Image (cartoon, rainbow, N blue to C red):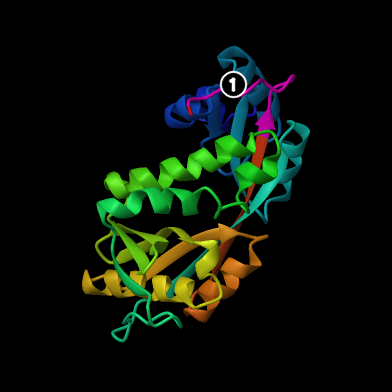
């Protein structure tokens, strides 16, 4: 008997991800629900073979033992702990300044893009794509270059930049997921500007941006292995809300990735 919930076809459990497929140059999909039932792994394997899916993502809860056992039986490998933190945006959410008095926080400008792309290519090495080990590192770099560029082009509601005499030194992307709820997306600080309070200033600037637009709360997602980011957000008042597990399931043999540069 199929493990699909309530007799649903496996297509209701998995779907192809068009953007990821185009970027990586291989068929990529995801499991669309958080819980796996006994037998779902067999259905998933059949679907992946039929769709020629090379890599399948699965975001699982940490507290469902049956789901974790079924994911492992189905050939998924753990690649990340997804930590969600949240904070109440209070009336005193005003920007703090970096320790470097020559650094200011302002909206992104066109002339910042090239420097921000360079920072993005070196700032997200704790993510699941690098940790997986099967995605080429240069393609992972390109993923975050694309991510910050498209955030500037409209993926994000705002991109705030830490700037000094040398140009852009860091960024934070801001998203309004609901009229009263904000979300910090990407945050990155150039190597030369680290250790000067720039990251904390960017987070506070994002919270002030949310507050000015009526948001009462904000969230951010980071990796369980990224303790530096966790400390940054905790210093800014964020507390842990939830944790999930990211799994990847690869076809055998693992395909060659030759997506667009």
Residue 11, percent from left and from top = 51, 23
Characterize the magenta stretch by its predominant secondary structure.
Answer: loop
- Residue at 56 percent of width and 75 percent of height: 195
Q: Quadrant of residue 141?
A: top right
* Relative side of 123 to 248, left or right: left
Q: Secondary structure at mark 1?
A: loop
User: Which residue extends farthest front?
Assistant: 165
Residue 220, percent from left and from top = 46, 63
Residue 13, percent from left and from top = 54, 30
- State the quadrant of the N terminus: top right
Q: Quadrant of residue 161?
A: bottom left
Task: Work out whether residue 28 can be spotted.
Answer: yes
Residue ID for mark 1: 53
User: Which residue extends farthest bottom?
Assistant: 92
- Residue at 76 percent of width and 42 percent of height: 69
Segment tinted magenta in the rendering = 249-260
* Relative side of 241 to 161, left or right: right
- Judge whether 30 appears above or below 52 on screen: below
Tell me if residue 106 is in the magenta stretch: no
Task: Work out whether residue 16 can be spotted.
Answer: no
- Judge whether 215 appears above or below 197 on screen: above
Residue 134, percent from left and from top = 69, 33
Image label count: 1
- Residue at 73 percent of width and 50 percent of height: 65
Crowd rating for badge 1 (residues with CA inside 10 Å; few <14, some 14–19, many 20+): many
Camera-nearest residue between 207 and 144 = 144
User: Which residue extends farthest top?
Assistant: 50
- Judge whether 128 appears above or below 168 on screen: above
* Relative side of 231 to 205, left or right: right
- Residue at 51 percent of width and 59 percent of height: 221
């Amino acid at each position: 008997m199929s493990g699909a919930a309530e007799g649903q076809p496996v297509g209701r459990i998995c779907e192809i991800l068009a953007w990821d497929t185009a970027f990586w140059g291989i068929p990529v999909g995801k499991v669309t629900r958080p819980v796996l039932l006994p037998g779902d792994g067999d259905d998933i394997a059949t679907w992946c073979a039929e769709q020629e899916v090379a890599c399948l993502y699965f975001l699982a809860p940490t507290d469902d033992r049956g789901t974790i056992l079924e994911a492992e039986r189905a050939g998924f490998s753990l690649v990340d702990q997804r930590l969600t933190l949240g904070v109440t945006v209070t009336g005193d959410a005003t920007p703090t300044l970096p320790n470097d008095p020559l650094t200011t926080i302002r909206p992104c400008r066109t002339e910042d893009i090239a420097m921000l792309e360079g920072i993005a290519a070196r700032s997200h090495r704790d993510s699941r794509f690098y940790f997986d080990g099967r995605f080429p590192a240069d393609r992972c770099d390109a993923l975050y270059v694309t991510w910050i560029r498209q955030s500037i082009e409209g993926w994000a509601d705002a991109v705030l930049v830490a700037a000094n005499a040398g140009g852009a030194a860091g960024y934070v992307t801001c998203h309004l997921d609901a009229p009263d709820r904000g979300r910090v997306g990407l945050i990155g600080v150039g190597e030369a500007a680290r250790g000067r309070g720039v990251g904390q200033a960017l987070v506070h600037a994002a919270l002030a941006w949310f507050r000015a637009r009526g948001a009462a709360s904000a969230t951010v997602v980071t990796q369980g292995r990224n303790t530096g980011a966790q400390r940054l957000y905790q210093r800014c008042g964020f507390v842990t809300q939830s944790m999930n597990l990211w799994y990847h399931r690869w076809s055998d043999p693992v395909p060659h990735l030759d997506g667009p540069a």
